[in-house]
Image (cartoon, rainbow, N blue to C red):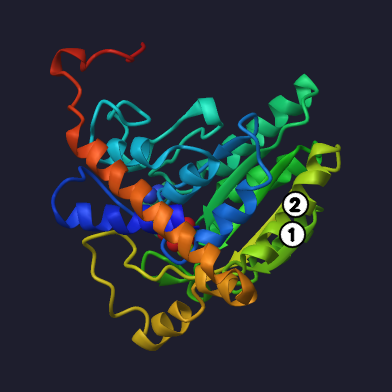
């Protein structure tokens, strides 16, 4: 969670400094979800992500320096500087990609589950997606197919209660997304998405079930993003400052620390170690070259 938080804060500062080319949606406030789920995954499991995917990539094992360099458009980035925030991928750690299109990651993770089932592998496909994606056709198609074939796919809905500026309570008459699992005949679970231990427990059960042939699960994690939808966007007019403050008080890192009063020194040491890691990563990214223009048509297939 510290790696995600401090990387995102460095990215926000970098965006303000003009170092980031393209969109930058941070995951600040939602770190417990990626951390709690990815703690159960290996590099053989396939993760499909969204436009808000930095936390997923980091938790799956992409080093901060490769992620930051990617957003800076540098050749040392995980996608060699060609993808940016919306197309960062690292198949060597099972990070199969972020996407600027809301919804398809659900179908891709279903496809990964189908692949693992056909190959007889004990791996899982995981889709992270927002509350907004739950009203996209891909949600219904993906969950239905995964249920029919009992695929090893885990659907993680990060319900931060808004799709850009649209409240989930406006976008659906049933804002308890986990209850929609029943209509596909699969288990649906709801957890406090700011409680890393609760996420970790629910994900652990679902992933173990999927690995042993028990089929898919939908996990809704109720959470909140505490920064604007994307860096450089306004953050008013659609939610109240009181709500933002209320959720900031439920910071997932502080909530975990509060559960372990004996471990404060260790928490402080982790925070200091991560600070050094992220500072080094930013320096590495700044010092890295842009891809040579002569290579612009490399990696293009027709
Ligand atoms: C198919 C599609 N429709 C609309 C958009 C525009 N769009 C970008 S982000 C976003 C909101 C997504 O909300 P949610 O799924 O809740 O994710 P969050 O940003 O809250 O993490 C929308 C509608 C898009 N990128 N793709
Ligand atoms: Mg949302």
Q: Assess mark 1: CB under 8 A from ligand 1?
A: no
Residue 292 located left or right of residue 8: left
Task: Mark yes or no: residue 27 visible.
Answer: no
Report which quarter residue 63 is drawn in: top left
Q: What is the number of the mark on residue 204?
A: 2
Report which quarter residue 194 is drawn in: bottom right
Residue at the image position 52 percent from the left and 46 percent from the top: 59
* 188 shown above or below 146: below
Residue 111 located left or right of residue 267: right
* Label 1 environment density (alpha carbons within 10 Å; few <14, some 14–19, many ≥20): some
Residue at the image position 48 percent from the left and 57 percent from the top: 270
* 185 shown above or below 83: below
The residue labelled by disc 1 is 201
Marks 2 & 1, CB-CB < 8 Å contact? yes
* 100 shown above or below 165: above
- The x and y percentages for residue 44 are 64, 29
Q: In front: 230, or 26?
A: 26
- The x and y percentages for residue 29 are 45, 67
Task: Mark yes or no: residue 213 visible.
Answer: yes
Quadrant location, the C terminus: top left
- The x and y percentages for residue 60 are 54, 41
Label 2, label 1: how far apart the Cα atoms are: 5 Å
């Amino acid at each position: 969670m510290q790696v995600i938080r401090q990387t995102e804060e460095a990215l926000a500062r970098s965006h303000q400094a003009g170092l980031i080319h393209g969109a930058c949606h941070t995951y600040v406030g939602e770190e417990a979800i990626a951390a709690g789920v990815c703690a159960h995954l290996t590099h053989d499991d396939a993760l499909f992500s969204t436009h808000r995917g930095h936390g997923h990539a980091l938790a799956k094992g992409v080093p901060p320096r490769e992620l930051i360099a990617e957003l800076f458009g540098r050749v040392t980035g995980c996608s060699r500087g060609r993808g940016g925030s919306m197309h960062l991928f690292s198949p060597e750690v099972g990070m199969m990609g972020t996407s600027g299109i809301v919804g398809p990651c659900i179908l891709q993770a279903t496809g990964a589950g189908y692949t693992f089932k056909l190959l007889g592998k004990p791996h899982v496909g995981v889709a992270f997606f927002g509350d907004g994606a739950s009203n996209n056709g891909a949600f219904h198609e993906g969950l239905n197919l995964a249920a029919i074939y009992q695929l090893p796919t885990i659907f993680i809905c990060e319900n931060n209660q808004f799709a850009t500026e649209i409240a989930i309570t406006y976008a659906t008459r049933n804002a308890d997304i986990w209850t929609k699992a029943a209509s596909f005949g699969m288990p649906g679970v709801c957890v406090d998405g700011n409680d890393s231990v609760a996420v970790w427990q629910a994900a652990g059960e679902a992933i173990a079930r999927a690995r042993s042939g028990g089929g898919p699960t939908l996990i809704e994690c109720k959470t909140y993003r505490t920064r604007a939808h994307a860096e450089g966007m306004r953050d008013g007019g659609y939610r109240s400052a009181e709500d933002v403050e209320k959720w900031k008080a439920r910071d997932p890192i502080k909530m975990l620390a509060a559960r372990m009063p004996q471990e404060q020194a260790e928490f402080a040491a982790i925070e200091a170690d991560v600070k050094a890691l992220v500072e080094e990563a930013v320096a590495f990214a700044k010092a890295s070259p842009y891809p040579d223009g002569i290579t612009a048509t490399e990696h293009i297939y027709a």
